Image (spheres, rainbow, N blue to C red):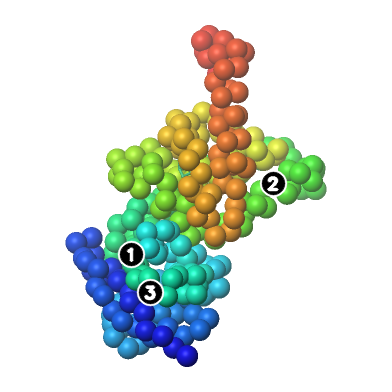
Amino acid sequence: MPTERTFRVWRGGADGELAEYTVEVHEGEVVLDILHRLQATQTPDLAVRWNCKAGKCGSCSMEINGRPRLSCMARMSTFEEDETIIVTPMRTFPVIRDLVCDVSYNYQKAREIPSFTPDPETRPGDFRMQQSDVERPQEFRKCIECFLCQDVCHVIRDHEENKRNFSGPRFLMRVAELEMHPKDTEDRRMVAQEEFGMGYCNITKCCTEVCPEHIKITDNALIPLKERVADRKYDPVVWLGDKIGLR
Ligand code: SF4
Ligand code: F3S
Ligand code: FES
């Protein structure tokens, strides 16, 4: 039996506003279904990005009642029956229109990270790694690039000025993955601190809380990376090498 629900949806660009709609909801539906019903019945020009409707493409990220979420995974049955559902675009990125943001900041940050750099002398078949080193990055590789962690992180959420110096949790996780790779020859520790803004992260763990893939971004990537940065910074041999210009 369908019910009528109240939705408030962001319409327009940065200077847009919330518009209220009453819309039918059927059993088993998710927020993205309701946005599609709005498009089909009341707002054919409502802009919303989506693709897989299975929580795997990372396209349908938005904020639902203020929380960064995938709209295709937000079940209507999890809201109170009389609850008004407020749907807004991700706040950290510029709005293009309605629920669609310009997420190019993230692609820019991805491009800034030097890629995997193995020893050029290593021949095919010579890579030998511990099983634990093989398994560690598999968690990080579950990332679907939904950018919800980037959206929620307070360092850039309300601080446009920090975007230039901070890569955000998703890309610091990539730096950590490479830094912990036993066959990567780059020393990424000071770069993590000085170019990707590791020091801005104060381990609030909000990124981990919103990750739809349940990646332990803070515990398994950011904290180990911070520990490695600290090890290098306070290593007396490194300090001496820096002083006498050997490093
Ligand atoms: Fe999304 Fe998680 Fe990847 Fe961040 S780490 S972009 S929250 S899947
Ligand atoms: Fe931001 Fe995550 Fe650190 S939310 S402050 S990157 S722990
Ligand atoms: Fe692909 Fe939601 S539509 S993750």
Image coordinates of residue 207 in percent, x first then y, are: 49, 49
Q: Which residue is mark 2?
A: 136
The image shows residue 113, relative to residue 245, as above or below, that is below
Residue 134, labelled with which disc? none
Of helix, strand and loop, which one carries label 1?
strand
Marks 3,1: beta carbons within 8 A: no
Disc number lying in front (1 or 2): 1
The image shows residue 123, relative to residue 33, as above or below, that is above
Amino acid marked by disc 2: Arg
Marks 2,3: beta carbons within 8 A: no
Image coordinates of residue 13 in percent, x first then y, are: 23, 65
Q: Which residue is mark 1?
A: 88
Of helix, strand and loop, which one carries label 3?
loop
Q: Which residue is mark 3?
A: 82
Q: Residue at x 65, y 38 (%)?
A: 180
Whole-number angstrom distance, CA of label 2 to CA of label 3: 44 Å
Whole-number angstrom distance, CA of label 1 to CA of label 2: 35 Å
Q: Which quadrant of the figure has residue 231?
A: top right
Q: Residue at x 73, y 43 (%)?
A: 133
Of helix, strand and loop, which one carries label 2?
helix
Q: Residue at x 51, y 28 (%)?
A: 190
Amino acid marked by disc 3: Asp
Asked whether the viewer can see residue 33, the reply is yes
Q: Earlier in the sequence, mark 1 or mark 2?
A: 1
Q: In this view, which residue lies farthest toward the left?
A: 15
Image coordinates of residue 48 in percent, x first then y, are: 37, 73
Asked whether the viewer can see residue 36, the reply is no
Amino acid marked by disc 1: Thr
Q: Earlier in the sequence, mark 3 or mark 1?
A: 3
